[in-house]
Image (cartoon, grey):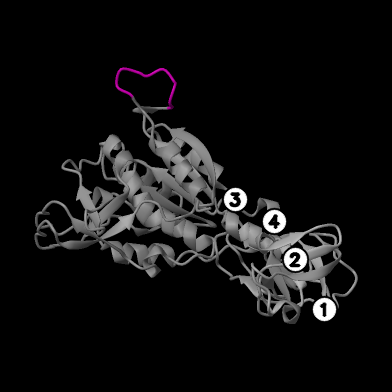
Amino acid sequence: MISVAEARARILSAFAPLPAETIALTDALGRVLAEPVFARLTQPPFHAAAMDGWAVRAADIAAATAESPVPLRRIGESSAGHAFTGRVGPGEAVRIFTGAPLPDGADAVVMQEDCNADDTTVWIGRAVVAGRFIREAGFDFTLGQELLPKGRRLTARDIALAAGGNVPWLSVHRRPRIAILATGDEIALPGDPLGPSQIVSTNALGLCALVAAQGGLAHNLGVAKDTPESVATLAKGAAGCDLLVTTGGAAHGDYDLVRDVLAERGVALEVQTVAMRPGKALMFGRAGSVPLLGLPGNPVSTGVTAVLFLRQILRLLQGLPPEDDRLPLRARLTTALKANDRREEYLRATLAAGPDGVLTVTPFARQDSAITTLYAQADCLIPRPPNADPEPAGAMVTVLSLTDGALSI
């Protein structure tokens, strides 16, 4: 067996960011930028009002108070999309609305709450300094300014920013195409009739959902029977994909055929077993243009190894850094942990805010790799190094979130 760190290094060394493609801004949510986004205009392109009110010359109303308002001649109006084309001179004012261009000659805006007006005159009841309630041209960004960096996964907020920069097209990394192949005579698809010794397949659909949530395109190849011919035939469907992920058949049992079938077809296995729990029966290899990641068959083992390895591959293919490059999340244990053995362990757990505001983490009492209900309730993993000492309740530990913000808005 090799360590998780060594397995991760070997696996990730086989991948590089996928080539770029140009897509419409409307299709860019969740995609990762292959090139930075630069503003194609200045925003706002003119000095604009930050409030509804009156555009004035600050010097004209320096003595204005609520008790002694200063009268100004009303000469026009400036609204969003309809600028006042004249010039504000001494003793004059223009009605203005939020976002509208500031008229020439004016240098301040007085809120409408501090004014009274009729058809010809406005009485200003508060003095303001020059620049008050004005957003200067370029207040947000300027032409040519970098708005979004290369390597950013785009959120709804990013889409809005790019749109504001007048950017209709973006260069993003191609979405990874991931083939998913489940194996085993014992599994059937949800909704299909179940034989007396069968269970419902959960792994393939869970992996497809993880791939989609991480920005990839999942191709479900179906369920291979426990024969070399079935495994080999369905595996051919991975042609043209960036990765083939199998689930089940990676161990050394009599019916674990994936390892042997692929070895016969020239797959050079670089990872075969990993010193971890759950997920020891993990393999990785390459044959031709499609790498293979073989995950174990127990559903929680599949889920945990997918988080630790498949999610990392998907990030790398899209030009994102590995999750280890992010700041680690720390939480306070609510229960004690026993000493660990020689395998790295990943405990399923839940997070909560403690009474003092510190993040707390509670591992489940049952950690069996077949308990899918608890894995669905978990929102983090507690990684435990090999031969780790016991940890008392109240100790601070590192946790690995099961949600990395891929679907952030």
- Asked if residue 386 is among those painted magenta in the image, a careful observer would answer no
Q: Which residue is mark 2?
A: 123
Q: Is 371 drawn above or below residue 216 in the view shown?
A: above
- Which residue is found at the position 45% from the left and 55% from the top? 405
Which mark lies nearer to you, 2 or 4?
Answer: 2
Q: Nearer the viewer, residue 252 or 210?
A: 210
Q: Quadrant of the N terminus?
A: bottom left
Identify the main secondary structure in magenta.
loop
- Which residue is found at the position 35% from the left and 41% from the top? 248
Q: Is 154 drawn above or below residue 65 in the view shown?
A: above
Residue type at the position of mark 3: Gly
Tell which circle, 3 or 1, labels the residue nearer the N-terminal end: 1
Q: Which residue is mark 3?
A: 240
Tell which circle, 1 or 4, labels the residue nearer the N-terminal end: 4
For the record, the magenta segment spans 189-198
Residue type at the position of mark 4: Leu
Q: Position of residue 49 (x, y in %)?
A: 72, 67
